[in-house]
Image (tube, rainbow, N blue to C red):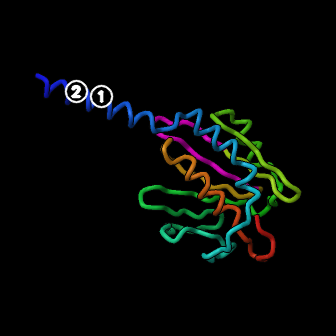
Amino acid sequence: MIRKRLSLIFITSLILFASGCSLSEEETLENIRATIDRSFSSQALEPNREFDNFNIYLPEHFTVIEESDRNLIFNDQDQTYILFYNDLEDASSEAFYQAEKAGGQYDLLETYQDDDHFAYVKVTELERDFELQVGVGGVRITTQTSLNHLEEDFTEIVKMINSIQFQDFEEQV
């Protein structure tokens, strides 16, 4: 009987401890909101992958699945990312952002702007996870991720999107 009670207390404590270590959705979104300016204004990483129309930094463990005229699909293990770009929009374009804002379906929609760039981050809760979309001008990267990986994936996507250099390889997004 005592052993059974101790086991129950241990299991309950373990569950409470584990659930206390995870950030809530509100805390995670606030953390992303608080780091937007710093993330987008950080020094761009040097591109390490070349494609037909642009160069980009992709972490070494990412695998490119498909490249087409305006899309690049890549993954990291079982997580897929879709990069879409419109080369008719420059780095200060608000077109993608305005479309997302008009759609009205998001839990977070925040922007960043400097002299040359307009950027946004959108987070939408789905049935079991979240859609994360980060855009700069005419480029956006979208993925689905868990709440536990949302901040990390945001940081990773910003590194990638900030590194993009288009065909003339002079102007970075």
Q: Position of residue 131 (x, y in %)?
A: 56, 44
Q: Residue at x 65, y 76 (%)?
A: 52
The residue at which mark 1 appears reads as 12
Q: Position of residue 95 (x, y in %)?
A: 78, 49
- Looking at the rendered structure, the secondary structure element under dot 2 is helix
Q: In the rendered structure, which segment of residues is drawn in magenta? A: 122-136
Q: Is residue 60 left or right of residue 163?
A: left
The amino acid on which the numbered mark 1 sits, given as a three-letter code, is: Thr
Q: Is residue 36 left or right of residue 8?
A: right
Between residue 95 and residue 170, name the one nearer to us. 170
The residue at which mark 2 appears reads as 8
Q: Image quarter for residue 19?
A: top left
In the image, residue 87 above or below residue 29: below
Q: Position of residue 43 (x, y in %)?
A: 74, 65
Q: Residue at x 77, y 57 (%)?
A: 41
The amino acid on which the numbered mark 2 sits, given as a three-letter code, is: Leu
In the image, residue 22 above or below residue 91: above
